[in-house]
Image (tube, helix red, strand yellow):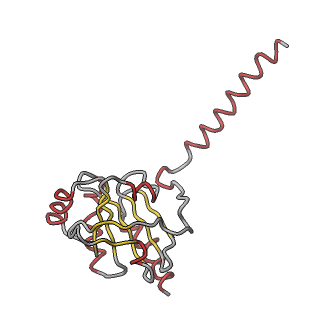
Amino acid sequence: MKYLKFLLPMGIFLVLVLFLGAGLKLDPKEVPSPLIGKPAPAFALARLDAPEQKIARDDLLGQVWMLNVWASWCVACRQEHPLLVEFSKAKTLPIYGLNYKDQRAAGLKWLADFGNPYTASLSDLDGRVGIDFGVYGVPETFIIDREGVVRFKHIGPVTPEVIRTQIEPLVRKLNG
């Protein structure tokens, strides 16, 4: 009986240490998305530059497209933005912005100051569409196929390597 009092807490402690050790080996940038392989959440949002016009997910069916979640208050978005501006010039695929929890005027000023890589940027003022997409924080980037299925998610700023080794090959495959 004396050993049971000692062994039970020791066993629980060892299990916790194992879980902690396994968790420390995980890359926080590789948070799996439950949306991969599933239809993108439905939405209908006002354009940032023309709030009287709405764009819905179903309007984008039939094409492979990128959704880039960004905000004017996001420091990491400023880091990735020049790369998106450059990437958009190649016209590899249409890039739609999701201006997340941001004020319209601030978002428009930011695009005017730093360039606009987006085919259109949509205003997600209350963040509900971002939540539907499982956004953890900005920036996040998704690739959606012709049928509206999410095929890729990247958390954090997109890098030249991510574009070259992941996004471009995937877009070629989906368009091929």
Q: Residue furthest top?
A: 2
Q: Residue at x 51, y 78 (%)?
A: 147
150 vs 113, left or right, is: right
Q: Nearer the viewer, residue 92 or 102?
A: 102
Q: Quadrant of residue 66?
A: bottom left
Q: Residue at x 18, y 56 (%)?
A: 106
42 vs 72, left or right, is: right
Q: Position of residue 76 (x, y in %)?
A: 30, 54
Q: Is residue 36 above or below residue 28?
A: below
Q: Residue furthest bottom?
A: 176
Q: Residue at x 30, y 71 (%)?
A: 54
Q: Position of residue 113 (x, y in %)?
A: 14, 63
57 vs 72, left or right, is: right
Q: Nearer the viewer, residue 163 or 57?
A: 57
Q: Position of residue 126 (x, y in %)?
A: 33, 52
Q: How many marks?
A: 0
Q: Is residue 67 above or below residue 104?
A: below
Quarter of the image with the N terminus in it: top right
Q: Is residue 6 above or below residue 31?
A: above
Q: Position of residue 134 (x, y in %)?
A: 46, 55
Q: Residue furthest right?
A: 1
